[in-house]
Image (cartoon, helix red, strand yellow):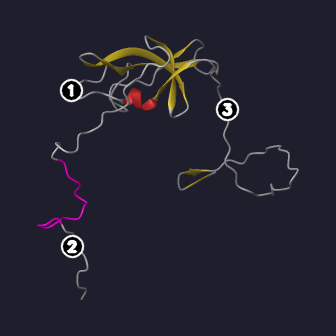
Amino acid sequence: TTVQNVFTYTVMLAAENKDEKLLPGMTASVSFEVEHAKDVLKVPNAALRFLPAGEAPLADNSGGGKRGEGRGEGKPEGKPEGKTDWKRVTKGRVWISGPSGPFAVLIETGSTDGSFTVLTKGELIEGQEVITGLAADTKDSGMSNPFAPSRGPGGGGGGGGRGR
């Protein structure tokens, strides 16, 4: 059923209940393992989203950039649509540090758990560091927090104002 864009599914499960902690009508959060990967390289999803300043996203289905900016959804490999045993492959790139700054390494990725993505092809090796972001130098950046309280001369804070 759908109520206000919330989907509710009725599911029948069989589970041991030795301690009788499970009661009829209880709500449960359930996770299903739909795929298991063993002995694979994985990269943090933040590395797949990272794009150095001045770099353009790659063309269709080739990664880089933010969602919808040149990162394709991938292509099915193997069985035709309607079959369940095909793998989704997405081309992309990750950035690693080099002597003259960050440089791109082209890769292909497979399954993800939301935090990490399996690397299916590429020139990365186990243990190699990838760039997930750059730290900002806040001292010289000229940036300030617009939500911070302003400080008057002498650096003291305000406080204790009179109410009406």
What is the span of residues highlighted in magenta in the rendered image? 143-155
Marks 3/2: CA distance?
A: 55 Å
- Residue 137 locus on image (x, y percent): 23, 40
Q: Nearer the viewer, residue 61 or 118?
A: 118
| Structural crowding at the residue carrying mark 3, measured as other residues with C-alpha within 10 Å and reported as few (<14), some (14–19) or many (≥20) | few
Q: Identity of the amino acid at label 2?
A: Gly
Q: Is residue 18 left or right of residue 67?
A: right
Q: Nearer the viewer, mark 2 or mark 1?
A: 2
Q: Residue furthest bottom?
A: 164
Q: Main secondary structure of the magenta part?
A: loop
Q: Is residue 59 visible?
A: no
Q: Identity of the amino acid at label 3?
A: Glu
Residue position marked by numbered label 1 in the rendering? 54
Q: Is residue 17 above or below residue 31?
A: below
Q: Is residue 35 above or below residue 120?
A: below
Q: Is residue 22 left or right of residue 74?
A: right
Q: Nearer the viewer, mark 1 or mark 3?
A: 1
SS type, badge 3: loop
Give residue 107's quadrant in the image: top left
First along the sequence among labels 3 and 2:
3
Residue position marked by numbered label 3 in the rendering? 33
| Structural crowding at the residue carrying mark 2, measured as other residues with C-alpha within 10 Å and reported as few (<14), some (14–19) or many (≥20) | few
Q: Identity of the amino acid at label 1?
A: Gly
SS type, badge 2: loop
Marks 1/3: CA distance?
A: 40 Å
Q: Is residue 69 left or right of residue 111?
A: left
Residue position marked by numbered label 2 in the rendering? 158
Is there CB contact under 8 Å for labels 1 and 3? no
